């Protein structure tokens, strides 16, 4: 059944992963339905700052230090992907701002990564996450993807059960539920996932700066509003804004831009799903008929086109490409 072209495919989750996968499959002529309990954009993908930032992620998220080459390959799929969907992509880059000591440390770490130290790099790009999500959704609809409201509770080929007890007929399930399915539920591999709550502040920008600014303990990402982010609260999966957690962000942002007025800033909260090595789970589950596309950590937008290509390759029996082993959903199983 796995590589049959007429299979009815359910994609659980309408975040960046689920939408990119569904679009890719529908354009390849597959019959696809997205199932999600939340309103459009009400997920981490909608909250995200939209940075496609291999260098900054390798620099500032220790778990991603060894993934620079892989993240660059993922980023390099974006120009074609974005152009096809008419998603505006900012390639202005990133600037590092801070004390001399901090900038010297950044320069040292850039060298260790094999990147020529500079205060400004044009390697890291950006998009407007909520806009991109809406455009992906519209493209998926246009390509024939059906959308249903519901939360997937269980699956076996031919029977997808929703939490309200409804049973629908689907042959394959792509699990793209972000942090929503964990602890081995639905597919045993999801027991490798853990939540990381993330809060960011949004406030009107001071100027029309196009670069992302990275400072000590904070980034300022331009866009429709300036995104000041982001907290990393490991083990938490609640969506409550929490002023004590965002205090450090406020202080760090004001150290960079003292004239920012953060009194009226809004707080947005999302939950990322991570694996122990920071890379997603993409590939077949041990549970028959389930394909995994979860565990994007801080890079769901960066990885979305790559993950969509990989899922499409797995479903057609094609070679999923050079990232297959790094993303293997079974890599955390005890021998
Ligand atoms: C503050 C913050 C800033 C970020 N900034 C960036 C950034 O700059 N660049 C970047 O690349 N990434 C960033 N990220 C990370 C990025 O948002 C995530 O990696 C990405 O959104 C994950 O996409 P996803 O589709 O896997 O999951 P999600 O966007 O979480 O979507 C999962 C969907 O699954 C649905 N779902 C859950 N359970 C079920 C179920 N049982 N059945 C059906 N549907 C279900 C949910 O309702 C949800 O809509 C940021 C995250 C946060 C929180």
Image (spheres, rainbow, N blue to C red):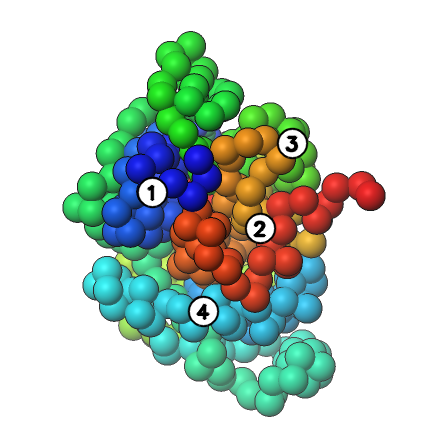
Query: Which residue is pictured at 50% across the width and 60% down the height?
Result: 319
Residue at image position (58%, 73%) is 69
Question: Which residue is pictured at 67% across the width and 68% down the height?
Answer: 65
Cα–Cα span, label 1 and label 2: 26 Å
The residue depicted at 44 percent of the width and 35 percent of the height is: 1
Tag 3 residue: 188
Q: Which residue is mark 4?
A: 75
Separation of marks 1 and 3 at Cα, in angstroms: 26 Å
Mark 4 / mark 1, whichever is N-terminal: 1
Q: Residue furthest left?
A: 142
- Marks 3 and 2 sit apart, C-alpha to C-alpha, by 15 Å
**Alpha carbon separation for disc pair 3 and 4:** 30 Å
For label 1, the residue is 5
Kind of element beneath mark 3:
helix
Q: Verify CB contact (< 8 Å) between mark 1 and mark 3.
A: no
Q: Is 311 or 157 nearer to us in this picture?
A: 157
Question: Mark 2 and mark 4 in contact (Cβ < 8 Å)?
Answer: no
Tag shown at residue 280: 2
Q: How many numbered marks appear?
A: 4
Q: Secondary structure at mark 2?
A: loop
Q: Is residue 41 left or right of residue 281?
A: left
Instruction: Work out which residue is located at the far right of the displayed protein and give it.
Output: 335
Q: Nearer the viewer, residue 167 or 298?
A: 167
Q: Secondary structure at mark 4?
A: helix
Dot 4, crowdedness within 10 Å: few (<14), some or many (≥20)? many
- In the image, residue 41 above or below residue 326: above
């Amino acid at each position: 059944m796995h590589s049959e072209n007429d299979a009815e495919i359910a994609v659980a989750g309408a975040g960046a992963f689920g939408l990119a996968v569904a679009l890719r499959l529908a354009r390849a002529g597959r019959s696809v339905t997205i199932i999600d309990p939340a309103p459009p954009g009400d997920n981490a993908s909608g909250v995200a700052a939209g940075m496609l930032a291999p260098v900054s992620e390798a620099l500032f998220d220790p778990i991603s230090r060894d993934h620079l080459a892989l993240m660059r390959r993922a980023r390099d799929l974006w120009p074609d992907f974005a152009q096809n969907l008419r998603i505006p992509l900012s390639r202005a880059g990133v600037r590092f701002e801070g004390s001399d000591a901090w900038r010297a440390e950044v320069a040292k770490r850039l060298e260790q990564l094999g990147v020529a130290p500079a205060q400004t790099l044009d390697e890291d790009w950006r998009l407007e996450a909520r806009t991109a999500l809406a455009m992906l959704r519209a493209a998926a609809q246009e390509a024939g993807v059906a959308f249903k409201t519901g939360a997937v509770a269980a699956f076996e080929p031919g029977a997808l059960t929703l939490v309200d007890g409804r049973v629908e007929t689907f042959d394959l399930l792509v699990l793209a539920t972000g942090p929503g399915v964990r602890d081995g539920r639905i597919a045993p591999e999801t027991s490798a996932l853990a939540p990381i709550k993330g809060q960011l502040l949004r406030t009107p920008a001071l100027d029309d700066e196009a670069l992302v600014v990275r400072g000590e303990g904070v980034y300022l990402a331009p866009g429709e509003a300036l995104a000041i982010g982001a907290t990393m609260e490991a083990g938490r999966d609640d969506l409550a804004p929490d002023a004590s957690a965002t205090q450090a962000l406020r202080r760090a942002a004001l150290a960079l831009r003292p004239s920012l007025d953060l009194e009226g800033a809004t707080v947005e909260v999302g939950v990322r799903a991570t694996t122990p090595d920071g890379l997603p789970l993409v590939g077949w589950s041990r549970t028959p008929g389930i394909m995994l596309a979860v565990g994007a950590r801080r890079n769901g937008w960066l990885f979305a086109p790559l993950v969509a290509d990989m899922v499409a390759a797995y479903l057609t029996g094609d070679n999923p490409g050079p990232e297959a082993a790094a993303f293997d959903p079974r890599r955390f199983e005890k021998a």
